[in-house]
Image (cartoon, rainbow, N blue to C red):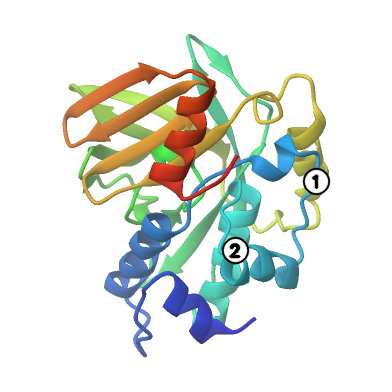
Amino acid sequence: MDTQKYLEYIKAERRSELSLGYLSHLQKQHVLQVHFENLDILAKKPLSLREEDLYQKIVHAKKGGVCYELNGIFYFLLKELGFVPYLMAGTVYVGNGVWALENAHLFNIVPLDNEEYLVDVGMGGNSPRLPVPMSGGEVVDSDGIYRVYQDETNSLYYLQKKTDEEWENQYRFETPSHQWNLENIHPICVLTETSPESMFNKMYFLSRVTENGRITLLGNTLIIVDGKEKTKEKLEGHEIEEAARRYFQINI
């Protein structure tokens, strides 16, 4: 993997210090430049989680990907720069009391200065732009406040986002450990690609983070968040293609 080309692609600086400021810079630049998208899954093209294949797809071919790919390649970048991240799996909250496939979301945890931070560049429209401390401290982002909440009764952690004075669960995960890697998460990745219960093989899911919000194309619905303003629009066939080109520079 050519680390310098990777940094140039996400428009990030190379710095010598391993600080929270630098980690924040890398995370923000990554989510601004690399989009979440499921086009390979829709095309029934099997995903590869090998480092070289991830590099070729995301940096060389300038494509996006799903959480396994985005957080996977970011894990390799952080290691190349001297950080010591480890991978964790979580379960996404769909809403209305429903949770998605167990442990089907992959993200990073980065130890730094006697603290651990949740670092996620692969949550689509809900990716925080900044590291979120595992200790429960709140992080103010442009479209909400994030925190990691620990349920001490059953050792579960929750990434939560506060909007309109309500804390909403994004996903849950067990006590962080070093048990997860790209090899043992791969069977769950295959389920995400192929399972009848997966939403990723049924409709377009394109999402990008902007300076002031997010833009998401979910099926035929275009969702634009700009600060506190949010719009949703149903699109027809040709409008879907136009939205993909305009907002994601993707031909579908």
Q: Are marks 2 and 1 in contact (CB under 8 Å)?
A: no
Above or below, comparing residue 229 to residue 233 in the picture: below
* Residue 149: quarter of image: top left
Q: Quadrant of the N terminus?
A: bottom right
Q: Which residue is mark 2?
A: 58
Q: Which residue is nearer to you in this view: 83 or 127?
A: 127
In the image, residue 214 above or below residue 22: above
For the point 56% across and 77% down, the residue is 79
Percent from the top left, x then y, of residue 228?
16, 30
Q: Residues within 10 Å of mark 2 (few under 14, many from 20)?
A: some
- Report the label total: 2
Does residue 165 sit above or below 54 in this rendering?
Answer: above
**26, above or below 191, in the image:** below
Classify mark 1: helix, strand or loop: loop
User: What x and y, as percent, mark residue 176?
Assistant: 57, 50
Tell me the amino acid under the disc marked 2: Ile
Under tag 2, what secondary structure? helix
Three-letter amino acid code at the position of disc 1: Lys
Q: CA distance from mark 2 to mark 1?
A: 15 Å
Question: Which labelled disc corresponds to residue 142?
Answer: none
Query: Where in the figure is residue 240, as x and y percent of width and height?
Result: 49, 28
Q: Residue at x 36, y 47 (%)?
A: 209
Res. 158 visible in picture: no
The quarter in which the C terminus is drawn is top right
Residue placed furthest toward the front: 238
Q: Which residue carries the number 1 mark? A: 45
- Drawn side of residue 105 relative to residue 224, left or right: right
**Label 1 crowd bin: few (<14), some (14–19), many (20+), radius 10 Å:** few
Residue 28 locus on image (x, y percent): 34, 60
Relative horizontal placement of residue 160, taking residue 194 as reference (left or right): left
In this view, the residue in front, 163 or 210, is: 210
Q: Earlier in the sequence, mark 2 or mark 1?
A: 1
